[in-house]
Image (spheres, helix red, strand yellow):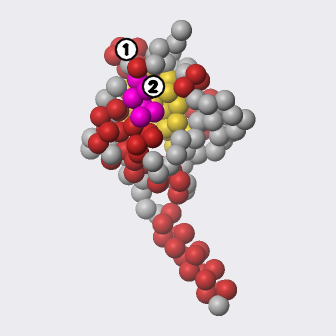
Amino acid sequence: MYKMIGLLLLLSAFCFAGEPHKWNEEAIDWVAYKEATGLMKDKGKKGLLVVYADWCSTCRTFSKQFKDPSVVQASKSFVMIKANVEKDQELAQKYNLDGSYVPRTFVLNEKGEVIEELYPEKPKWRFFLPSDNSAFLGAFMKRAATFSAH
C-alpha cells in the first residue's frame, strides 16, 4: 500500500514538474535584466524582478498570480523582469541577499538596487511573497509603485 502511494506521489510530482510556468506574457511585458536596467532609467520606473526556477512548484503557483487583473494593472507601473536561476546564475547570485530560495521578488530602483524598506525585517526569506495570494501581490505592487525613499 505504501509503495503504491509513494509511486503515485512520485509520478504526480514528475508530471506536474513538466507543466510550464504561466507568467501571463500575453498581458505583461516581461524583459530580460540586461534590457531592464536601461528601461528603468529611460522610463523612470522601478523594476519588479522575480527570480524563479523551472523545477519549483511554488514558483509555478506564484506565476499564476500574474493573470489577476489587479496584478496586471499594477505591473504597468514597473519594468517587469523575470530571471531563471538555472539560466542566469550570475544574476541569481547577485540577488542572493538572504538565501538562494525561490521564488524571490525584488522591487528595484532605477539603478537596479533593491528597495529594502518595502520588505519586513526578518532573518530569512525576506523577499518571499505569498505564492497563492494575488490580492497581496497586487497591493504590494501598488504600494511599491508609489513608494519613495526619504
Whether tag 2 and tag 1 are in contact, CB under 8 A, the answer is no
Which x, y percent locates residue 146?
40, 20
Crowding at dot 1, Cα within 10 Å, few <14 / some 14-19 / many 20+, comes out as some
Q: Nearer the viewer, residue 9 or 34?
A: 9
In the rendered structure, which amino acid carries the disc numbered 1?
Gly
- In the image: residue 88, left or right of residue 65: right
Question: Which image quarter is the N terminus in?
Answer: bottom right
Q: Residue at 61% x, 83% y: name it.
A: 5
In this view of the protein, can residue 21 be seen by the observer?
yes
Mark nearer the N terminus (2 vs 1): 1
Residue extending furthest toward the right = 123
Provide the residue designation for mark 1: 44
Q: Nearer the viewer, residue 24 or 133?
A: 133
In this view of the protein, can residue 81 be seen by the observer?
no
Magenta-tinted stretch: 139-145
Q: Residue at 42% x, 31% y: name it.
A: 141
Q: Residue at 47% x, 14% y: name it.
A: 148
Between the residue at mark 2 and the residue at mark 1, the CA separation in whole angstroms equals 14 Å
Which x, y percent locates residue 19?
43, 62
Foreground disc of the pair 2, 1: 2
Counting the numbered discs, the total is 2
Which x, y percent locates residue 108?
50, 23
| SS of the residue under disc 2 | helix
Provide the residue designation for mark 2: 144
